[in-house]
Image: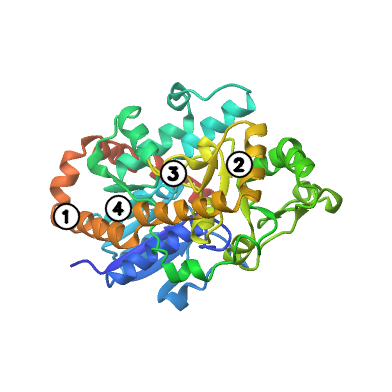
């Protein structure tokens, strides 16, 4: 590749042991490092105790400020060839500054997931009704998110279903979209042999960051509707629940007598997943791909989830466990998977096949490299063909820009 300098502007500092978003970001960093980029990661977020040490990966860390012209001086001096925005909110905040100060820089957006889809599903759930595609067109977040996608040269979309929505519901041109799921290493026979056996595993597991609303809702669902059914049939079984940023409302669900155990942040997520017999993830709303379910496959742990949980994850391949949308069915399948060794082993193999066929990092990185090389060679033509993006960039430089400058002046 001819381009060598990448600026990533992060919504938060990456925490790969806390969230799928953190793992996704580290996969992208790995891709660009493997293609000889120098990388600067900038964020206005506060440091956290659980953020990854970026310097140890050869990435320069830079703290920046919102609504402050100091970013202009920083980006002009850095003069990156490529800028990657971490979620649409970051593109809203910094995209116009990048376009104005580094007009030749390729602008990439990693959506993580479609926020408008997650928000619309959550609203429908709370209103006790089915989600409709028309909900998306009424969602304010959708207008902001689609505008951000249109302004960028290319957006990474993690889910095939979300690519379909962008094409068919929002009529986004596919030339500015790139399907990019998790990029994972293949699991070898040797890896499989060293995993804990069926007999050595004896509990259920849920793991998820509690800053993420779907995770909190899932734990409530487990506590109220599903775990009592499982516990009735398996009185000695326990459900271990791990997750960072657990609030008091989460912690108070802990009940040792019921085997419902709230255990806080896992020191090493892969270890706790590897030790579990079955992962329970009855997710009722959300979007994107579920990192906890990929993590289960990587660690040879079968799972029981919902249609939304498994959305776009396995294509036509058999799931590594069961997909059910009714509390009773979820409980029955979880019990069956927990007790049936032959079924459990086959489910484990299904998960390994899904990783190999759908998330092969070698294949996905090769495709991504070609797409970015084409973008480098044809950027002017690519931008000319994206008239709506140019139109939005034109107006954004006169609206978002002056709102930001007003905030900056007010802060002085």
Percent x, y of residue 338: 65, 50
Closer-to-camera residue (257/251): 257
Q: Which mark is residue 56?
A: none
Residues under labels 4 and 3: Cα distance?
37 Å
**Label 4: element kind:** strand
User: Cβ–Cβ below 8 Å for labels 3 and 2?
Assistant: no
Percent x, y of residue 140: 48, 30
Q: Mark 2 points at which residue?
A: 214
Mark positioned earlier in the residue sequence (1 or 3): 3
Instruction: Check the picture and name the quadrant holding the N terminus.
Output: bottom left
**Label 2: element kind:** helix
Characterize the local packing of mark 4: few (<14), some (14-19) or many (20 or more) Cα atoms within 10 angstroms. many
Whether residue 211 is visible here, answered yes or no, is no
Q: Which mark is residue 318?
A: 3
Mark positioned earlier in the residue sequence (1 or 2): 2
Percent x, y of residue 47: 58, 66
Q: In this view, does 275 lie to the left or right of 14?
A: right
Whether residue 140 is visible here, answered yes or no, is yes
Percent x, y of residue 353: 40, 54
């Amino acid at each position: 590749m001819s381009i060598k300098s990448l600026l990533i502007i992060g919504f938060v500092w990456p925490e790969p042991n806390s969230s799928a978003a953190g793992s996704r970001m580290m996969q992208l960093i790995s891709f660009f490092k493997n293609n000889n980029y120098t990388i600067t990661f900038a964020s206005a977020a506060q440091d956290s105790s659980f953020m990854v040490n970026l310097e140890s990966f050869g990435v320069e860390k830079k703290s920046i400020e919102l609504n402050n012209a100091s970013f202009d001086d920083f980006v002009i001096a850095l003069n990156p060839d490529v800028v990657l925005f971490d979620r649409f909110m970051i593109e809203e905040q910094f995209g116009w500054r990048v376009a104005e100060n580094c007009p030749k820089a390729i602008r990439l957006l990693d959506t993580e997931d479609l926020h408008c889809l997650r928000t619309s599903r959550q609203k429908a759930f709370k209103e006790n009704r089915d989600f409709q595609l028309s909900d998306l067109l009424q969602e304010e977040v959708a207008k902001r998110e689609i505008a951000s996608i249109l302004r960028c040269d290319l957006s990474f979309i993690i889910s095939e279903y979300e690519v379909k929505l962008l094409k068919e519901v929002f009529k986004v041109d596919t030339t500015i979209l790139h399907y990019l799921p998790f990029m994972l290493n293949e699991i070898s026979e040797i890896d499989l042999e060293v995993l804990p056996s069926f007999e050595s595993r004896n509990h259920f597991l849920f793991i998820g960051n509690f800053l993420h609303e779907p995770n909190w809702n899932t734990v409530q669902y487990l506590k109220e509707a599903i775990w009592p059914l499982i516990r009735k049939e398996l009185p000695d079984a326990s459900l271990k629940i791990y997750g960072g940023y657990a609030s008091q409302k989460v912690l108070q669900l802990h009940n040792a007598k019921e085997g419902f155990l709230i255990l806080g942040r896992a020191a090493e997520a892969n270890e706790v997943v590897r030790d579990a017999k079955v992962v329970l993830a009855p997710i009722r709303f959300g979007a994107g791909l579920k990192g906890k379910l990929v993590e289960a496959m990587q660690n040879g742990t079968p799972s029981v989830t919902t249609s939304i949980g498994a959305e776009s994850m396995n294509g036509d391949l058999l799931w590594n466990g069961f997909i059910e949308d009714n509390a009773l069915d979820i409980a029955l399948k979880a019990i069956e998977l927990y007790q049936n060794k032959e079924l459990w082993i086959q489910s484990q193999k299904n998960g390994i096949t899904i990783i190999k066929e759908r998330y092969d990092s070698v294949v996905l990185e090769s495709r991504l490299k070609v797409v970015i090389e084409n973008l480098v060679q044809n950027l002017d033509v690519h931008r000319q063909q994206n008239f709506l993006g140019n139109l939005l960039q034109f107006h954004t430089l006169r609206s978002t820009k002056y709102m930001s400058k007003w905030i900056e002046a007010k802060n002085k």
